[in-house]
Each structure stands twice: as structure tokens, then as C-alpha cells.
Amino acid sequence: MELEFTVNGREYVQDVPPDTRLIDFLREDLNLTSVKEGCGVGECGSCTVLVDGKSILSCLTYMPEIDGKEVLTLEGITDGDELHPLQQAFIDTGGVQCGFCTPGFIMVALELLNENPDPTRDEIRKWIEGNICRCTGYRKIVDAIELAARWMREGQEAVEA
Ligand code: FES
Ligand code: FES
């Protein structure tokens, strides 16, 4: 089945079997290994990517669903060699431990901060409740998202000044 879509800003016209899961295409065909398969059944959030700016679970998404759409993975959020503020904040706060869950958390956090640049800690907690982390106890993840939000607002203010 011929599909047209973009991944991390690059356009693809691709013949793909319609029963291909998005996670498998991203990891195996495009080598975008930030997309992690935890549970494979929609429970853990580690496979989260953005499609047209909205977070989706790539383990539950089949390729025909992304026809004509834009997919963004963690690999697509960096600016050259520079880490995205969310990546830096996860490192600085200890929000990354084993790291398996981190790409999924960063993608949902990016969706949140695009919609709400100044969320409260409660709003952050609620937003990330579909993502599971076995290591951090979540407080450091909330710290990371709060810190990145502040950096991103300050960066925006500096651009506007
Ligand atoms: S691997 Fe997709 S939700 Fe767990
Ligand atoms: S850092 Fe290990 S699962 Fe979250």
C-alpha cells in the first residue's frame, strides 16, 4: 500500500504492508531506536511519538493511519548537536535513570509545552499519567518538565526582547 508521510521533517513515499505497526517501521526501517517497545499493548507510553503534534502510541498505530501526516520522534527534536531543553532538563534533574521510558516522556511533555508553556506541577502530573517509569518515582520527571518549561519560556522571551 503506497503511503505518503513525513518523519522528522523528511518526506517519504513508501510501499508498506498495511498491517505494519508504526513502531516497527520507525525502529526497523528508519532505525529510529528512541522509540521503545515496553508493553506493546498500549499500557506504558514508552513508544509515544507525535503525529501532527498529538501524542500517539506507536505500538497501537498501523501505517495507513499516518498517511498524509507528520510524525515526530525524539531524534527529530534536537537542533544539530544541541540537546532540546527537555533532554537537558531530564539529565540535569535526574529524570533519566535507565532511560527506557525517557523518549516517551519527552514526547508527551513536548506536546504539553506546545499547548501550555507554563503548566502547574499538577497539570504536568496529570498529563504524563499514561507513561510508566519504573526507576524515578516520577518527582524528578515532573521537576525536569517544569525546568524545561521555564528554560523554553525564558528562551522565547529572549527572542522577543
Ligand atoms: S509499548 Fe506502546 S504503550 Fe507500551
Ligand atoms: S528511567 Fe528507567 S523506566 Fe524510567
Image (cartoon, helix red, strand yellow):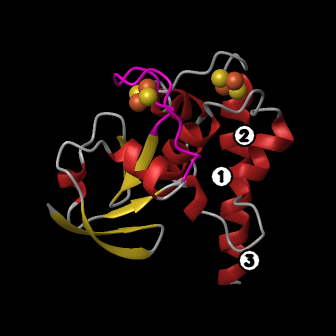
**Which numbered tag is attached to residue 149?**
1
Q: Nearer the viewer, residue 47 or 155?
A: 47
| Magenta residues (range) | 32-47
Residue shown at the point (57%, 47%) measured from the top left: 33
Task: Indicate the amino acid at tag 2.
Answer: Ala
Residue shown at the point (45%, 40%) measured from the top left: 48
Query: Spatial distance from mark 2 to mark 3, Cα to Cα?
Result: 21 Å
- Residue at which label 3 appears: 158
Task: Indicate the amino acid at tag 3.
Answer: Ala
Q: Are marks 3 and 1 in contact (CB under 8 Å)?
A: no
Q: Nearer the viewer, mark 2 or mark 3?
A: 2
Q: Position of residue 3 (x, y in %)?
A: 20, 66
Element on which disc 1 rests: helix
Left or right, residue 3 beside residue 121: left
Q: Are marks 1 and 2 in contact (CB under 8 Å)?
A: no
To which quarter of the image does residue 79 belong?
bottom right
- Callout 1 environment at 10 Å: few (<14), some (14 to 19), or many (20+)? many
